[in-house]
Amino acid sequence: MAKENKKAALSMEERLDAALVPDWEQPYKVPANWCWTKMDSVAQWGSGGTPSRRNPDYYGGQIPWVKTGELNDDYIYETEETITEEGLKCSSAKLYPINTIIIAMYGATVGKVGILGVEATTNQACACGVCSSAVNYQYLFYYAWSQKDIFIDLARGGAQPNISQEIIKNHPIPIPPLAEQQRIVDRIESLFAKLDEAKEKAQEVVDGYDARRAAILHKAFTGELTAEWRIINGIGNDSWKTCKFDDCINVMQNGLAKRKGDSGEPYVVLRLANLSEDGFDENDLREIVLDEKEQKSYELHSDDVLMVRVNGSKDNVGKQYQITSQKKWAFCDHIIRIRYANNVLPEYMVYYSKSSKYRQYIKENMVSTAGQNTISRKGMARLQVPIPTIGEQERIASILTDLFEKERQAVEASRQVIDQIDNMKKSILARAFRGELGTNDPTDESAIELLKETLNIEKAPTKRAKAVVIPKGFSANLETELEKKIIRLFYQKDTKELPIKDIITVSSKTFDVLDCLRGLERRQLITKLENGNYRLMG
């Protein structure tokens, strides 16, 4: 209390000096009519709380409850969980107004931001800022977004990757005049809209890869992809045959079960970890000493095909990989080695193993026990394989190799575009808060005057309010002095309706004002209108 009284006794100049960031602490130079202050000077900061999980009556109500994992650098309109009025009352959670800025303080989400699109509560991992009249809430949102990497760096100093409200409150922020704040917001959103459009198109390329690949494979194994090739080469559609998988193989063999050897030569024994979407991952190859008999039985040769026999993931079972060169490699017992017959090419069958028909067959015929999924030779026997001539198989494999390489390049290029767009957004934000977007008007009144006005209104009102009397019938229903101040303001301004920005000026404790408004609303002394204003009842 003594600290608050001392603060209230400061003169305007002293309060301004305390709010401004000294020249030597300013992160960088800004235009002359801007000023540096701290985030505590332009918003009232608080956090939330978590109602006890032991009481189910606290959850499932009508009040949105935000967790940091839901912060998405955008507006928040819906939440995964909601709480009840009782849960709000019996916890440290607070109800925050629309346009509150939220910054994640804890864990992997540190620095993520959001704007409340609805009134909501939050958990204690969220720092919540209710903007003063000195700052445009969207300006504060974009500035907080731009500081994410800095907040992450600040969080790395402790045992846990956390930041505190004090770090946020004391964080410097450049404040331009209000008109410039709006111009900056407008320019950011205009530039971001163009980037988001480009990012959306790039993301469509990435997200559509599986569907495009499936369509290409369908055309390949129905003959559509090579229809023109058959015409040119005088080959009819009746050249395609359907064979059982058993008729397409010479040998199927399970791999080596042992994990170490005592004598012989060292061989790399391929494990499931060495099989990847792109072929073989040679970063973690492991060797086992194999004797002469084992070498002869398990050594891999060019054009051998490996198939995943057992895996915890159903999506991996049955995948095939072609050995394209001779190496001192063998294979473990989670893998089957296939040597195909002369009527099919290994590369053709590897591509067929990626088709939707093949994958569907595997899922329907694998056996699942104890979390492991297995396909055997017996399980593969009834698989129907479309078989064209060897020449057409070669053509299909060649076309697929070319098409998939182009698809891979397109996806990679699109991912690079997405990364570049994210970096471009960071660059735009960095320039925005240096006054480098070409929007600043040097004739705008200095932001210091805006800060003075805010400090004057919110810390030390100079005008004596005219004496008003709240009707006795109304006054009897008021429980606290702060409630009386709020109701008195309606009578002072001789109006039945007030915006929230006017009401919060009755006290520097914004959150206490918000709690009072909720209490008055519950007792039907005031009501909140659709436009966000409050109306006096009676």
Image: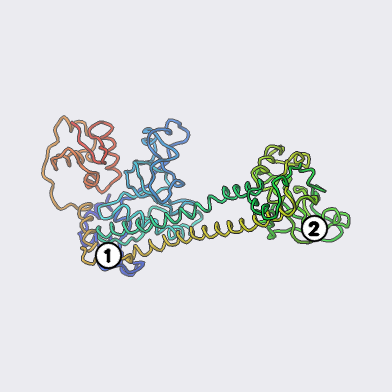
SS at badge 2: loop
Q: Earlier in the sequence, mark 2 or mark 1?
A: 2
Which circle marks residue 440 in the picture? Answer: 1
Q: Is residue 498 above or below residue 446?
A: above
Residue type, numbered disc 2 = His
SS at badge 1: loop
Q: Residue at x 46, y 47 (%)?
A: 69
User: Measured from the top left, where is residue 375 in percent x and y?
Assistant: 73, 41
Q: Residue at x 33, y 55 (%)?
A: 140
How many residues crowd mark 2 within 10 Å: few (<14), some (14–19), many (20+)?
Answer: some
Which residue is the extreme one toward the front? Answer: 234
Residue type, numbered disc 1 = Asn
How many residues crowd mark 1 within 10 Å: few (<14), some (14–19), many (20+)?
Answer: many
User: Measured from the top left, where is residue 439 in percent x and y?
Assistant: 29, 63
Residue nearest the viewer, comparing 26 with 10: 26
Q: Residue at x 65, y 52 (%)?
A: 226
Colour basis: rainbow
Q: Quadrant of residue 40?
A: bottom left
Residue nearest the viewer, comparing 464 with 295: 295
Q: Is residue 94 above or below residue 474?
A: below
C-alpha gap between disc 2 and disc 1 = 70 Å
The residue mark sitting in front, 2 or 1, is 2
Is residue 110 something one can see in this rendering?
yes
Question: Can you identify the residue that label 2 sits on?
Answer: 301
